[in-house]
Image (cartoon, helix red, strand yellow):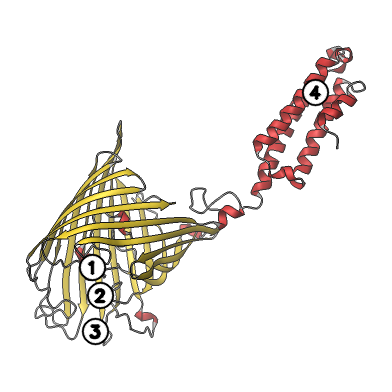
Amino acid sequence: MPRPSALSSRCRTVLSTRDRYALFVAILAFVALTAPLSASAQATDDTVDAELEALETELQESDLESPSLATPADENAPPEGVDDELERLEMEVSQGASSDQGDTQLPTRAAAMPGAGSGVVASMNPDISLIADFALAWFSEEPSLLGGHDATQTGFNLQGLELGLAAGIDPYWRFDSHILLSLFGLEIEEAYATTLALPFGLQARAGQFLTNFGRVNPTHLHAWNFTTQPLVLGKFFGGEGLRGLGAELGGLLPLPWLASWTLSAQNIAGGATGRSFLASDSDLTALSDLSVAFRLEQFWDVGSRTGALLGINAINGPNSSGRGNRSDIYGVDLLLKRTVTGNRGRSELGWQSEVMLRRRQDAGASDEATGTVLQDWGAYTEVFFSPDLFWSVAARYERVSGLEGDPLDPDWRHTRQRGALSLSYMPSHFSRLRLEYGLDHQPDGVHPLVHMVFLQLDLVAGAHGAHAY
C-alpha cells in the first residue's frame, strides 16, 4: 500500500473535501481492522497516536496547498457527525493496539498481586528476593538461646539467607516459597499454594507453611523487632517455629468489625518444628495424628490513627510420649499500634504481647500437682517506636515458667526471664542495621546472668512485599 503522503498527493486534484474526510475515515477503519494482524499490533499506544496525528497533519496541509478546491461551507462541509466518528475511530485504534497485547495475558485477581505482570512473559516470571541476615555477637557467658536463627556464638554469625519466590499462577492459584540457605545446607521453610477464587470469601492454602498461631510464629526473621526469637516459641514450638505439611482454610466473619478465622491441619513433628508434638521419626497412621490449629483474629479502630488487633489461638495434636497422649497449646496475642503521618514521614508507636499456655499428657511425668498432665506457660511483651522511616527503638520483656520432672526440659525447673533493648537504623526499605543488648536470667543455668550484645545487618535484594500489620 502506498505511503499516506503519496496517496494524499495523488488524490489532491480529484477529491473534494467531503471525499477526503471519507478517505480518512476509511484509512482509520483499515488500520483498526488490520492492526491485530500486522507487526504494528505490538507497538505502543504512543506510536499509534503519532501515526494518527501524521495523517491528520497531511490532510490539513492538503487543504492549505489546494485552495482552489475549497467550496462554500454550505455545499461541501463535512457531513454532520464526522468529527465524532473520527474521535471514535481513534479511540478504537488505540484500544485495539492495547488489547492485542492484553489478549495473551492470564487474568489475575488484582494488579497488586506479586507475579501479576502484563503479558505471558511477565506472569511466567516469579518475584524473586534474597534476604541476608548477619550478626556480630558477644556473650559474657555461654548462652542458652532457643531460636534456630539466633546468633549463638561470639563473633560473626550468618543467621539466614532466605530465597523467596512468589508468583500468580493463574486466576485460581498463587504460589509462595521461602528457602533458607545456610553454611551447612538448604532448608525449605515454606512452599505453598493459595487459592484466589473460592466462593463465599473463603481462601485456602496447601503445602509446607508456618502455622498461623500468634504474632511471631507465622513471620520470618527479618520482620522481627529483635535479633532473637522469643523464648516461649523456642520452648513450645521449636527453634524453627511451628510448621509442617498440610492445608488451611480461612475467611472473614460477618461482624460489624473486621474479623477473620483460619483452621489448619498439618503434619507437625520434630524437635525443631513441633517440639510439643510428635518426634521427627514418628509415622502418621491415621488422620487423628494430624495437628489441628485454629486462629480467630479481630481488628478494631480505637481512634483516628490507632488500631487494636486481638488474636485467639489453639492447637491440638499427638505428642511423642506414646499411648495416644496429646498436647494442647492455647494463646492470646494483642497488638496496639498508633500511626501518625507528619513532616518527617510516618511515625509508629506500638505495643505487642503474647501469652501461651501448654498442657501435655505424659505418662512418664512426675509433676505432683497435675499428675500425668504437665502444664506450663510463657509470655513476652514489647513496645516499639519509630519516629520516622529511618529509626526505630524497641524494648522486650519475657517470662517462661519451668516444671519439675519435665522429660522435654529436665533442667528447666524455675521461671526464666529475659530482657532486651534494640536500636535500628534503616537507610532504605532494603537494608537495616540493628544494635541490641540483652540480659538473660537463668536460675537453672551454670551462669544465672548472661549479658548479650548483637550488631545485626539485614539486606534485601529483589522484590519484597509489605509486611503484615
Gap in angstroms between the C-alphas marked 1 and 3: 19 Å
Find disc 2 in the rendering and name its residue.
276
**Is label 3 in contact with label 4 (beta carbons under 8 Å)?**
no
Q: Of circles 1 and 3, which is in front?
A: 1
Gap in angstroms between the C-alphas marked 2 and 1: 10 Å
Q: Residue reaching furthest bottom?
A: 323
Amino acid on which disc 1 is placed = Gly
Q: Which mark is residue 59?
A: 4
Q: Which mark is residue 321?
A: 3
Q: Please tell me how crowded label 4 is: few (under 14), some (14-19), or many (20+) other residues with Cα within 10 Å.
A: many
Counting from the top left corner in percent of width and height, residue 427 is at 32, 42
Amino acid on which disc 2 is placed = Ser
Q: Is residue 273 left or right of residue 43?
A: left
Question: Which comes before the other along the chain, label 2 or label 1?
Answer: 1
Q: Residue at x 60, y 54 (%)?
A: 121
Q: Residue at x 89, y 25 (%)?
A: 11
Q: Please tell me how crowded label 3 is: few (under 14), some (14-19), or many (20+) other residues with Cα within 10 Å.
A: many
* Residue 107 seen from this side: no
- Residue 442 versus residue 264: which sits nearer the camera? 442
